[in-house]
Image: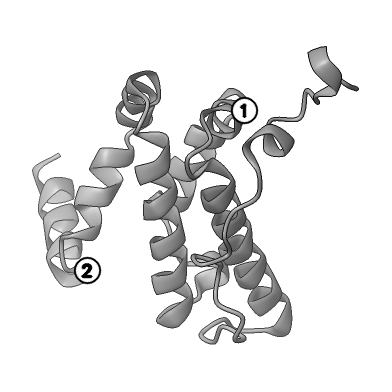
Amino acid sequence: AGGPGGGTDDPSARCGGGSGADAAPTATLGGASSSADVARAEALVYSLGALKNASTACADNAEHLVARGGVEILARVLRDPRPGGATGEVRAQVLVQATALVRNLTVSAAHRRQVVAAGIVGHLCGLLVPPCARAEAEAEAEAEA
């Protein structure tokens, strides 16, 4: 539907498309255990890349993403960035796209608060801890409980 002056209510039309410079990689991503897992992993990487590009320099697109639960979904992705148990390149690409999307969303003060409230900062910090140290810390915490 058109808005005032023949415009559109679609924020992506108002903001224009991304340049494509940061588009998700086109190579098939390895590390997943089956072709269905590979397809899901690729879909996640490409979806994150598309959302990242749509939210770049376009507050309307970012606002729509946040209003539709995007922050909570992003928190779930960052909690376990290995779709279908995939490792290596898939995990790296998920993290590249997801962290760029976090960067785009946190331009807004209101979105920054939601990102913090959703635990995304904690998930990002958790990624800085080597997996073996994380497992040891979890085992120690269970032993103390």
- Secondary structure state at the residue bearing disc 1: helix
Mark 2 secondary-structure assignment? helix
Q: Is residue 53 above or below residue 115?
A: below
Q: In the picture, which quadrant includes the C terminus?
A: top left
Specify whether 80 is left or right of 35.
left
Instruction: Categorize mark 1 by other alpha carbons within 10 Å: few (<14), some (14-19), many (20+).
Output: some
Rendered residue at 67%/65% (across/down): 43
Residue 42, quarter of picture:
bottom right
- Amino acid at circle 2: Pro
Residue 3 in view (yes/no): no
Q: Residue 51, image x and y in percent?
A: 58, 48
Res 4 seen here = yes
Name the side, left or right, on which 1 lies relative to 83.
Answer: right
Q: Quadrant of the N terminus?
A: top right
Q: Position of residue 56 (x, y in %)?
A: 49, 45
- Please identify the residue farthest to the front as the structure is shown: 5
Whether residue 24 sits left or right of residue 138 in the image: it is right
Placement of 100 over or under 85, stated as above or below:
above
Residue at left offset 29%, top offset 47%? 123
Q: Nearer the viewer, residue 89 or 64?
A: 64
Q: Amino acid at mark 1?
A: His
How does the figure colour the protein chain or chains? one colour
Q: Which is in the foreground here, disc 1 or disc 2? A: 1
Residue 122 rendering spot, x and y as whole percentages: 24, 41
Mark 1, residue position = 64
**Viewer-closest of 137 and 12:** 12
Q: Nearer the viewer, residue 28 or 37?
A: 28
The residue located at (37%, 53%) in the rendering is: 99
From the image, tell me which residue sits under label 2.
Answer: 131
Residue 102, located in which quarter of the rendered image? top left
Residue at the image position 61 percent from the left and 55 percent from the top: 50
